[in-house]
Image: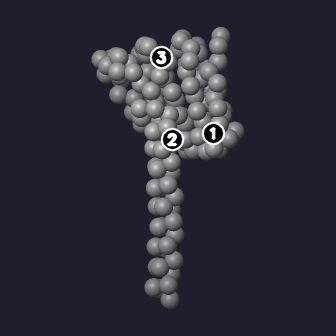
């Protein structure tokens, strides 16, 4: 069985699927990716499916499961490179892929994750500032 490599680029794990996704390969990717998220502490996952001509219902559901597992492990998932035929197939199969953001390519996916992470950190900083202001006001 072939394995899909999971590469670390900064705070992001990049998965570029270049082989046919058989069911067992998809399940192995799910496990490998969860392990790598925990090992690295990365907060973003990009799954590049531009080489896939077809995505069946099992692989589609597995992508949704990967996104759910990643979110529980504090990492957001972006699927990039989806071909129009794949998008049409997923819609026809009724797979909405909850929890998965999409982007046209890896560069846009990385920008999306960076923007989301920046907003998250700004919210934390804003909350700390609000708490400091509340302490000063109470004094």
Q: CA distance from mark 3 to mark 1?
A: 22 Å
Quadrant assignment for the N terminus: top right
81 with respect to 1 (left or right): left
Q: CA distance from mark 2 to mark 1?
A: 10 Å
Q: Position of residue 67 (x, y in %)?
A: 49, 33
Taking the view exactly as shown, the residue that stands out farthest to the bottom is: 139
Q: CA distance from mark 2 to mark 3?
A: 20 Å
At 62% from the left and 21% from the top, the residue drawn is 4
Q: Say what secondary structure mark 2 lies in.
A: helix
Tell me if residue 8 can be seen: yes
Q: Say what secondary structure mark 3 lies in.
A: loop
Callout 3 crowding tier (Cα within 10 Å): few <14, some 14–19, many ≥20 = some
At 47% from the left and 85% from the top, the residue drawn is 138
In the image, residue 90 sits, relative to residue 131, either above or below, namely above
Residue denoted by label 2: 110
Callout 2 crowding tier (Cα within 10 Å): few <14, some 14–19, many ≥20 = many
Q: Nearer the viewer, residue 107 or 45?
A: 107
At 51% from the left and 41% from the top, the residue drawn is 110
On the image, which quarter does residue 28 sit in? top right
Residue denoted by label 3: 52
Tell me if residue 68 can be seen: no
Q: Position of residue 120 (x, y in %)?
A: 48, 55
Of the numbered discs 2 and 3, the one sitting upstream in the chain is 3
């Amino acid at each position: 069985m072939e394995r899909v490599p999971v590469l670390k680029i900064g705070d992001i794990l990049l998965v570029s699927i270049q082989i046919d996704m058989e069911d067992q390969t998809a399940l192995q990717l799910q496990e490998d990716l969860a392990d790598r998220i925990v090992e690295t502490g990365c907060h973003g996952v990009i799954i590049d499916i531009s080489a896939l001509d077809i995505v069946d219902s099992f692989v589609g559901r597995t992508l949704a499961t990967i996104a759910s597992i990643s979110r529980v492990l504090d990492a957001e998932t972006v699927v990039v490179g989806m071909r129009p035929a794949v998008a049409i197939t997923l819609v026809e199969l009724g797979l909405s892929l909850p929890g998965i953001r999409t982007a046209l390519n890896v560069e846009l996916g990385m920008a999306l994750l960076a923007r989301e992470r920046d907003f998250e950190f700004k919210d934390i900083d804003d909350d700390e500032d609000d708490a400091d202001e509340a302490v000063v006001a109470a004094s």
